[in-house]
Image: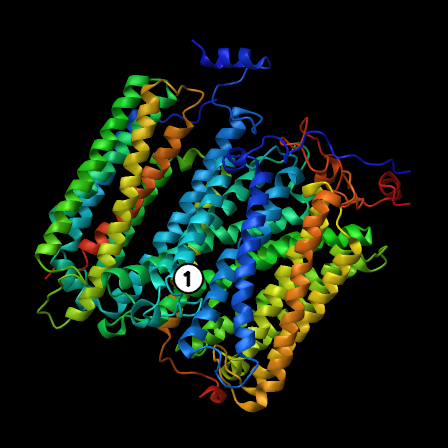
């Protein structure tokens, strides 16, 4: 058993978990600090993406026709698939955290690997989508061509499309990297029912990235599809 | 010292709901709801987001402080979007004070 | 009777030697010292750019620099001073050092993130240095589009990225402080027993985490436009340059409260110590810090009154800008009431506090002039604005920072500096500052535009006064470098509490041990208990 006990003996003082950092008095305090820290970080992310949503809000109001037309050129299927994939990855993530909470090491690792896999599927679909955009000359500044009377403002739509989904994809890549580390830690038996905070924190980050996509999908893919 | 452990069935139910809502979002986009298309899409997205936040992110079972952090982020996002649109929405509006004309 | 005091044998400065022990430290105190050195270097650099500006402006002709190069001088002065000096200053140095001892903790909640924020600051500064050596940047620190996103042929991208990166340093500091203050207070230390310095930093941290991300994403939007040819602010594609201004000022207005709130926190500590009296209206001062933080977020478009925003929204922003002055006034009245019937003395930290009162008052009141729509139409983009914000940022924020540095220096290094030289320096700073910036109010009122390197002859006398004042100010700023460094070796040993001040940080040795406290303190009393008993213990009577 216990790494924790051996650690305490080595310290020669009151028994405490191996993972307790010494500027904290208790594991509870450490967990509460980590949790608050992650939530405050997510708060910064809300404002970070928020600036882009603000730009989107303004220009969609000003140039609705351009936005509608540009949005219609984006294939819905990959977007819808990706939405399902990401929601699925949130499910596997939540189940992974639950497995860690209940001290099921193998299940934790399996769910985390599933989450990473789904994240990679998402990124793969995005690569396909981006390549498609380049082919169709929808990349502002690179090779943008459009016959539409709203070609200029369509560039604004696509600039926002690439910036928003690009920033989101960057967050996914970071998320996959973080998940890989957490999976490795889980495989090494670092977590138990008293200490699974890193899994939970990584989970919060992952769900947040899913949340952003939940808004990006209708705003970018479904501006006006009923004509 | 564990946090709240949700049953697996809850997670599967939420997942199911999210998938259904996604499908509704797509279908609703093909229906002409006039001015309501955007609000409907955003309302569904917000409902989905709420489910993720409350259940996947455990905010329903979290401390008051966590809930306050979530509320604060939304509050300031609303200020950003709202007060900025206040400018754009009122461009060209008539002004009451003659001295400023 | 004071026995000869001795430095503690083991303290944070000698606990581990060598570069690695500093560069890989998790000790918030060492990180604070490294920030101190870093931002002092940036302040010197920013001061050199200011010197370039003031020397050029001694003559009406633009004869020292070409117009484009003059643009680079004031731009880089602003970028360095705002992003690499003022925003970190008090929080990264004094906040980092003092918040854990003030709340009875061994360190901040996330020591490694603290170190990371320092590294990130260095990386951001490196980007700026690259931009500098590659030829500088001329967009103004405000980076307005479409000049910054399209037309400027200077090093906008590295400068903007430098500012972007340094923003993350600020965010991480704020995040760390918020979690620390919520979760690491010693037993018995309720929120309303916290020193007001801590309240001020809590409010500051709220602004850092809420506002900085918005300017970060705005810089990203300029970056993608410039680097990839995207069109978000490009008017030829339907983009709106005013959108940039909205997004930019959404952060940059609250940013000025990031700069002033910590200084106000310092003032609360200094004023109570050197009037030997508890702060009048403690909870009002505490709540006013929060009010400033929140209100600061809803007034930003007062920077844009003449940019083309709607008259209706201009009126709303003007009205709200008046209201944000109220919590600042509350603090000022409370400090004055603290002084009233206190046992006042004139040590150097207190001299800086007095200077702060006068200069912040003028700066704040002239802010109301600018919030007034009718006045702003005339003085926007003139030297009136320049004078206003320097009164607040230099006369307020920097005086607070220097006052804090002088107040807590004995705690940081265990030794006292020369009281005589420090008083001279404080007076030089005050006199030099007023000589530099008061004429600028008059110049602006008379119509001299900002960011111009040439001006009509009738403005020359005031400009010469301003440049002369800048010279005096510079000397005032250089003196502390000398006597602080001197004190490291030759200063009188300070002991734990040379000022007889209240607060947990004064009950640990100077310099403190790495872990701050041998055992976690338990707090029973109220803050700022200045009683005769305490004074006797501190050998002040």
Which secondary structure, mark 1?
Answer: helix
- Residue for point 36% across, 77% down: B91
Quarter of the image where the C terminus of chain C is located: top right
Whether residue C170 is visible here, answered yes or no, is yes
Apparent side of residue A79 relative to residue B59 in the rendered image (left or right): left
- Residue for point 12% across, 46% down: A128
The chain ID associated with circle 1 is C
The location of residue B29, given as percent across then percent down, is 16, 54
Residue under numbered circle 1: C132
The location of residue B9, given as percent across then percent down, is 28, 26
- Residue for point 36% across, 58% down: C158
Whether residue C280 is visible here, answered yes or no, is no
Apparent side of residue A189 relative to residue C199 in the rendered image (left or right): left
Taking C503 as reference, is A46 above or below it?
Answer: below
Along the viewing direction, whichever of A56 and B54 lies nearer the viewer:
A56
Q: Quadrant of residue C217?
A: bottom left
- Residue for point 28% across, 20% down: A107
Q: Quadrant of residue A182?
A: top left
The location of residue A88, given as percent across then percent down, is 22, 35
């Amino acid at each position: 058993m216990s790494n924790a006990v051996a650690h305490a003996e080595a310290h020669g003082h009151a028994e405490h978990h191996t993972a307790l950092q010494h500027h904290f008095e208790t594991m509870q305090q450490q967990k509460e600090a980590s949790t608050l820290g992650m939530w405050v970080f997510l708060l910064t992310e809300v404002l970070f993406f928020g600036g882009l949503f603000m730009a989107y809000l303004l220009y969609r109001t000003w140039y609705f026709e351009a936005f509608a037309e540009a949005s219609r050129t984006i294939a819905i299927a990959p977007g819808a698939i990706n939405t399902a994939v990401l929601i699925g990855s949130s499910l596997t993530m939540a189940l992974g955290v639950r497995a860690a909470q209940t001290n099921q090491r193998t299940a934790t690792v399996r769910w985390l690997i599933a989450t990473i896999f789904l994240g990679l599927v998402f990124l793969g679909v995005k690569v396909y989508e981006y390549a498609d955009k380049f082919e169709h000359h929808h990349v502002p500044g690179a090779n943008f061509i459009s016959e539409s009377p709203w070609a200029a403002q369509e560039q604004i739509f696509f600039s926002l499309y690439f910036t928003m989904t690009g920033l989101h994809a960057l967050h996914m890549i970071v998320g996959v990297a973080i998940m890989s580390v957490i999976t490795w830690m889980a495989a090494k038996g670092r977590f138990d029912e008293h200490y699974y905070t890193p899994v939970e924190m990584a989970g919060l980050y992952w769900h947040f990235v899913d949340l952003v996509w939940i808004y990006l999908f209708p705003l970018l893919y479904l501006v006006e599809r009923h004509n | 010292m564990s946090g709240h452990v949700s049953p697996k069935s809850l997670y599967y139910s939420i997942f199911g709901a999210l998938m259904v809502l996604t499908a509704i979002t797509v279908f609703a986009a093909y229906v002409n709801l006039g001015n309501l298309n955007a609000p409907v899409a955003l309302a569904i997205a917000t409902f989905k987001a709420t489910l993720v936040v409350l259940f996947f992110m455990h905010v329903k079972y979290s401390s008051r402080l966590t809930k306050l952090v979530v509320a604060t982020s939304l509050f300031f996002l609303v200020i950003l979007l709202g007060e900025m649109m206040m400018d754009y929405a009122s461009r060209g509006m008539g002004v009451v004070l003659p001295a400023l004309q | 009777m004071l026995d000869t005091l001795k430095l503690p044998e083991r303290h944070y400065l000698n606990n581990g030697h060598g570069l690695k022990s500093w560069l890989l430290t998790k000790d918030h105190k060492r990180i604070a010292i490294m920030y101190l050195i870093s931002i002092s270097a940036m302040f010197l650099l920013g001061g050199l750019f200011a010197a370039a500006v003031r020397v050029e402006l001694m003559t009406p002709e633009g004869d020292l620099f070409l117009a484009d190069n003059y643009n680079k001088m004031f731009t880089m002065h602003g970028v360095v001073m705002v992003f690499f000096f003022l925003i970190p200053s008090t929080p990264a140095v004094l906040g980092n050092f003092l918040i854990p001892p003030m709340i009875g903790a061994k360190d901040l909640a996330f020591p490694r993130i603290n170190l990371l924020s320092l590294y990130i600051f260095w990386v951001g500064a490196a980007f700026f240095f690259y931009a500098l050596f590659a030829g500088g940047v001329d967009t103004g620190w405000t980076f307005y589009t479409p000049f910054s996103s399209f037309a400027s042929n200077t090093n906008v991208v590295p400068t903007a990225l430098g500012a972007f990166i340094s923003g993350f340093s600020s965010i991480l500091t704020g995040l760390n402080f918020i979690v620390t203050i919520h979760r690491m207070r010693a037993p018995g230390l309720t929120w309303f027993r916290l020193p007001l310095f801590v309240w001020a930093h809590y409010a500051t941290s709220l602004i850092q985490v809420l506002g900085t991300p918005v300017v970060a994403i705005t810089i990203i939007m300029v970056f993608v436009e410039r680097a990839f040819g995207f069109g978000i602010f490009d008017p030829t594609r339907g983009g709106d340059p005013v959108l940039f201004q909205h997004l930019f000022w959404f952060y940059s207005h609250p940013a000025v409260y990031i700069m002033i709130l910590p200084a106000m926190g310092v003032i609360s500590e200094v004023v109570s110590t050197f009037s030997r009296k508890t702060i009048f209206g403690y909870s009002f001062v505490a709540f006013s810090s929060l009010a400033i933080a929140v209100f600061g977020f809803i007034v930003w478009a007062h920077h844009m009154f003449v940019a083309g925003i709607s008259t209706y929204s201009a009126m709303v922003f003007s009205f709200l800008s008046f209201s944000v002055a109220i919590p600042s006034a509350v603090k000022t009245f409370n400090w004055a009431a603290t002084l009233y019937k206190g046992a006042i003395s004139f040590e150097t930290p207190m001299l800086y506090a007095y200077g702060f009162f006068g200069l912040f008052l003028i700066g704040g009141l002239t802010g109301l002039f600018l919030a007034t729509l009718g006045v702003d139409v005339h003085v926007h983009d003139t030297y009136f604005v320049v004078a206003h914000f320097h009164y607040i940022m230099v006369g307020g924020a920097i005086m607070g920072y220097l006052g804090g540095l002088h107040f807590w220096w004995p705690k940081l290094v265990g030794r006292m500096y020369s009281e005589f030289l420090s008083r001279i320096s404080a007076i030089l700073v005050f006199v030099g500052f007023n000589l530099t910036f008061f004429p600028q109010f008059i110049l602006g009122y008379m119509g001299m535009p900002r960011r111009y390197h040439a001006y009509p002859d009738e403005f020359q006398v005031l400009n010469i006064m301003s440049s002369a004042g800048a010279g005096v100010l510079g000397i005032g700023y250089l003196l502390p470098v000398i006597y602080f460094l001197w004190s490291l070796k030759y200063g009188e040993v300070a002991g734990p509490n040379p000022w007889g001040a209240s607060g947990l940080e004064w009950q640990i040795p100077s310099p403190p041990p790495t872990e701050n406290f041998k055992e976690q303190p338990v707090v029973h009393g109220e803050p700022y208990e200045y009683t005769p008993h305490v004074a006797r213990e501190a050998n002040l009577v």
